[in-house]
Image (cartoon, grey):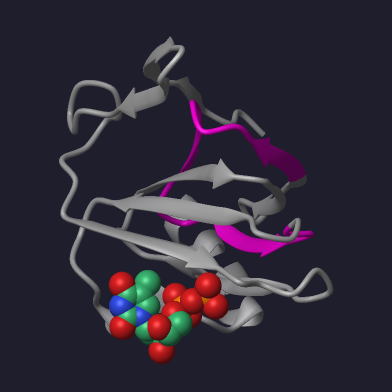
Amino acid sequence: MENRYFSFNNRQDAAGKLIFIEGEQDIPFAIARVYYICDVPGDVRRGFHAHKTLRQVLICAQGSCRILLDNGRERETVKLEGPTRGLLVDAGVWHEMYDFTPGAVLLVLASEHYDESDYIRDYDVFKAYRKENEK
Ligand code: TYD
């Protein structure tokens, strides 16, 4: 799987680190929505869905977690760590998030507003959707 990573600009000095991300410049889409996931117990797995059109960039702004990515043919696990690193989760990619360290914060930049009808939450439906779209 060809995962796409980003390394964001940051300014670091004795006063700390500042990271900045510009939509359509540092990532390949305009940012319509931002959300973040925190307080995830270490034994919990979440996600379990793909999106039809939504594109997202994931950043583990604090701590670390693992992301499982599945494009219908291949599966891969990525460890996400560090506030300057981003991972693109493109449309049509089944993903799961797990192994959150205590205090981890997963920041997500999304290309669209929230829309439940864009979700594919059933793995068999996802597999069929991918097959259909590869024709
Ligand atoms: P969901 O995307 O299923 O979270 P995860 O895959 O990490 O488990 O979202 C969980 C709930 O939150 C779901 O009921 C929809 C709601 N939600 C919103 O209302 N707006 C949002 O931007 C997001 C991401 C979720």
Q: Main secondary structure of the magenta part?
A: strand
Q: In the image, residue 35 lies at what x, y percent?
A: 35, 62
* Residue at point 24%, 77% (across, down): 115
Task: Give the left or right position of residue 78, taking residue 12 as reference.
Answer: right
* Residue at point 77%, 45% (across, down): 77
Task: Give the left or right position of residue 125, taking residue 107 as reference.
Answer: right
Residue 42 falls inside the magenta stretch: no
Q: Please give the count of numbered marks on the rendered protein.
A: 0
Residue 99 falls inside the magenta stretch: yes
Quadrant of the image containing the N terminus: top right
- View extreme (front): residue: 14
Q: In the image, residue 21 lies at what x, y percent?
A: 27, 29
Q: Nearer the viewer, residue 2 or 18?
A: 18
In this rendering, is residue 86 above or below 66? above
Q: Which of 36 and 92 is in front in this view?
A: 36
Q: In the image, residue 93 lies at what x, y percent?
A: 53, 55
- View extreme (right): residue: 43
In this rendering, is residue 90 above or below 33? above
Q: In the image, residue 74 lies at what x, y percent?
A: 74, 46
Answer whether residue 111 is visible to the viewer in this image.
yes
Judged from the image, the quadrant occupied by ligand 1 is bottom left
* Residue at point 46%, 57% (across, down): 92
Which segment is the magenta one? 77-100
Task: Give the left or right position of residue 20, taking residue 71 as reference.
Answer: left
